[in-house]
Amino acid sequence: MKRLLLTGLLCLMGTFLFAKKGYKIEIKFKQDMPDEYVYLAHYYAKPLPTIYKTDSAKVINKRSAVIDSKDSVLGGIYMILFAERSKYVEFVLDNGASMEMTIDTVNMPANITFKNSPENTRYVAYEQYLMGYGKKQAAIGEDMKAAKTEADTQAVRNKYKAALKELVTYRQDYVKKYPGTYLANVFNALKVPEIPEGTFYLEDKQTVDSNYAYRYYKTHFWDDFDFSDNRLMYSPIYDGKLDEYFNRLVVPLPDSMNAESDALLARTRKAKELFKYTLHWLARNAESSKVMGMDEVFVHLVEKYYMKGDAYWLDSASLSKYEDRAKKIAPNVLGNIAPELKLQDIHSLKDVSLHGVASKYTLVIFWSRECGHCMTEVPKLDSLYEKVLKQRGVKVYAVSTEGELSEIQKTVDKLTIGDWINVVDANNKKEYRSQYDVYSTPKIYLLDDQKKIIGKGLDHSNIVEVLDWTEKKNKTKS
């Protein structure tokens, strides 16, 4: 008897566990649909139009469809795409869901109803609230256009603040009423820190702390984000939060970026999908950044995570691309001693050592007469050199990367850059390409008197700024 009871309980438990996988969505349309199929899609960290289709179902009699699966699914905000994928309905989907959705296309989302899904009924109510909120915002915008005095403008600002507070209160009340639900986690993830009002002082109690608001906002930026909930990936939130934090709040210096990246990756370790997206986003953001020195962050991420097996989703070929890119960048990150070059003078063809150039600063320029951008940039660099850089102790080591020697000589004469140290790779060793990541031109580095790299990815518009910043930093140290 006991064995039968135990067996029955185990079977019941197995049935319960099985029911927690997959989903069943019965869709009914109140109007005829022209579609042969409707599609199930979801967000992936970004707002529309970035959506990912996962399933589909045939439309029956132009009025119904059933999308179901027995496979495990990552919950989140999903969409039913219809009307030839030109329209969609958002809803919350999670493992074990079995619901009925009725879509009235005349007035969406107001006329969308659900059975067996209380959270989606509440989601529809939220979407209806947002429609009203949007209309209120539009009216406030019109009021701002019509404002004629400072008093009018302030009155409109007060309306805007009141409306925003109302939206925040709506979400906070939802979180209190339905804690632990998916939408509650989404609303928490959307929260932004509310900076305390008042005047705040430094430790001397007299000097106003002008950075208090920034520090408070940054410190509390992730307070309400649940890093254990992978389902937040299937919402249009995370990418924007990463962008705001790392590209607006974190100091754009390699040390700061590395520390902040490591800290956030540590917080996402237990949530595979969040960790995967975070690491991918950070590496892509660092590699594509226009901010000088961010390539060092890319190298850091590759060496610490990709090369240690943490990028479990990549095959060996994809992984090797990251490793190869990092190896090309690593020798010339900021702070490193620039790799030695011994290239040949364009006239004598004698070796000229880069490390042998005696100067306070050395500007290393890789350029080509075949490159239209180079032919625009080089004259601007020369003008800057004659007016400013020469007086500040800068010498130019210019490497012409392609073309016949005689043509290079003519171009140098034409550009009147004979005062530069003009060299070519006459022996065709091509080592400089990998040493300095020269796969496009122009490529410009700035070195100090010890031949340490203090600037890279430069052009005529920002070289002086780097010099000023370097000298200011050195003066502060001394």
Image (tube, grey):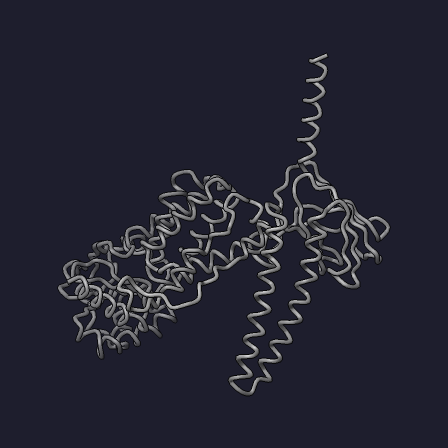
Q: Up-down: is 168 above or below 91? A: below
Question: Which image quarter: residue 116?
Answer: top right
| Identity of the residue furthest to the bottom in this view | 148
In this orientation, which residue lies closer to the viewer: 426 or 440? 440
Residue 420, given in percent of the width and then of the height, sits at: 21, 70
Left or right: 305, with 315 as reference point? left
In this orientation, which residue lies closer to the viewer: 398 or 456? 456
Q: How many marks?
A: 0
Instruction: For the C terminus, give its image quadrant.
Output: bottom left
Residue drawn at x 74%, y 41% as measured from the top left: 98
Res. 140 in view: yes
Left or right: 31, with 131 as reference point? right
Left or right: 129, with 153 as reference point? right
Residue 313, given in percent of the width and then of the height, sits at: 50, 41
Residue drawn at x 36%, y 43% as measured from the top left: 304
Residue 454, given in percent of the width and then of the height, sits at: 25, 61
Res. 351 in view: no
In this orientation, which residue lies closer to the viewer: 132 or 93? 132
| Identity of the residue furthest to the right in this view | 61
In this orientation, which residue lies closer to the viewer: 117 or 391? 117
Instruction: For the N terminus, give its image quadrant.
Output: top right
Residue 261, given in percent of the width and then of the height, sits at: 39, 50
Residue drawn at x 59%, y 45% as measured from the top left: 180
Residue drawn at x 51%, y 84% as measured from the top left: 150
